[in-house]
Image (cartoon, grey):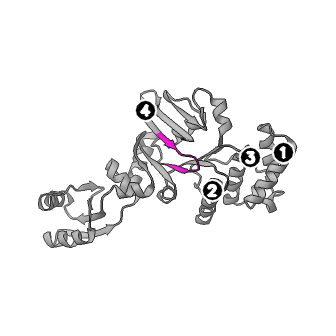
Amino acid sequence: MAEILVEAINVSYGSRRALIDVSFCVAPRQIYGLLGPNGGGKTTLFRVLCTLLKPTSGNAWVGGASVVEDPMAGRRQIGVVFQTNSLDRDLTVRENLLFEAYLRGISRSEARSRIAGLLEHFGLADRAGDMVGTLSGGLQRRLEIVKSVLHRPRVLILDEPSVSLDPTARFDLWNLLKTLRDQQSMTVLLTTHLMEEADRCDRLAILHQGRIVAEGTPESLKEKIGGDVVSIQAEDPVELAKLVQTHFGCPAQLVDGTLRLERPRGHQFVAQVIEAFPGRITAITVSRPTLEDVFIHQTGHQFVDEERRLEKQVS
């Protein structure tokens, strides 16, 4: 049974289609990532799942509740961590959590018990009386998560949770998310444009121009490449692409002026192509597929170039 089920979600802003027939499901106790360039539709989908935006068409269920038809029931199933900080810097850690409990209708005695347990469990007990403004960015993000699970939701949804965090804080964040999955049986869905973060997910969907172009575990997505990735630089890459296709009978993509091929036993192919076209190649590399390669394979664009293109459209 799916903990999150999304069926044929469409969102349009006038003539612009932000989400197009988006469907996927997330199993219980899974960390699921929505990977895509900024402007690709991740935050729009995040807003739909958090009941902040009603889709143009389609439906989505979280914990069995439709976030479209019964948003109040949907909100009871989710905890939400926004990209921007929602903490009151002029209150203490404990005061922030007590205020959240009040908003959630949790009794004072129950709130104190839950807060004490969560602060101890997530390593914030010794900072309970500190002003939030004195905490590091990593500790504030940890407190945001504690605040979002205070009402014991079935699903935690996070929008770009690692933004502005240093590598150590990112590592701590992922340990926390895995703890919620493994010890609290919580399902986690997050949006990200960071490849290394997406690689840590149990499963993920790749969004491009409002559509899901690939879905699966990180490893299964990379395995679909079907071999190694060979990148070739040349003075005339267009001509070399034609020669390679004629000589070896394999398709080659031109991505940002670099010839890109997917070949089994890539190291052997490198030797063959250098021997076949002496003097035409200025640089050549071979590597195992990455999620960046999956994105290029599906879209024909580099991830960072697509982000720049979308940012220009918005501006």
Find numbered disc 2 in the image and state the secondary structure of the residue it sits on: helix
Among the two numbered marks 2 and 4 on one chain, the one whose residue lies closer to the N terminus: 4
Mark sitting on residue 98 = none
Tell me the kind of residue under disc 2. Asp
Marks 1 and 2, how far apart at CA:
24 Å
Q: Position of residue 76 (x, y in %)?
A: 68, 36
Tell me the kind of residue under disc 4. Arg
Q: Main secondary structure of the magenta part?
A: strand
Magenta extent: 24-33
Among the two numbered marks 1 and 4 on one chain, the one whose residue lies closer to the N terminus: 4
Mark sitting on residue 17 = 4
Q: Which of labels 3 and 1 is toward the front?
A: 1
Mark 1: give few (<14), some (14-19) or many (20+) Cα within 10 Å: few
Tell me the kind of residue under disc 1. Glu
Find numbered disc 1 in the image and state the secondary structure of the residue it sits on: helix
Marks 4 and 3, how far apart at CA:
36 Å
Mark yes or no: residue 129 visible: yes
Quarter placement of the N terminus: top right
Mark 4: give few (<14), some (14-19) or many (20+) Cα within 10 Å: some
Mark yes or no: residue 91 visible: no
Marks 1 and 4, how far apart at CA:
45 Å
Q: Which of labels 1 and 4 is toward the front?
A: 1
Find numbered disc 4 in the image and state the secondary structure of the residue it sits on: strand
Proximity of marks 3 and 1: CB atoms separated by less than 8 Å: no
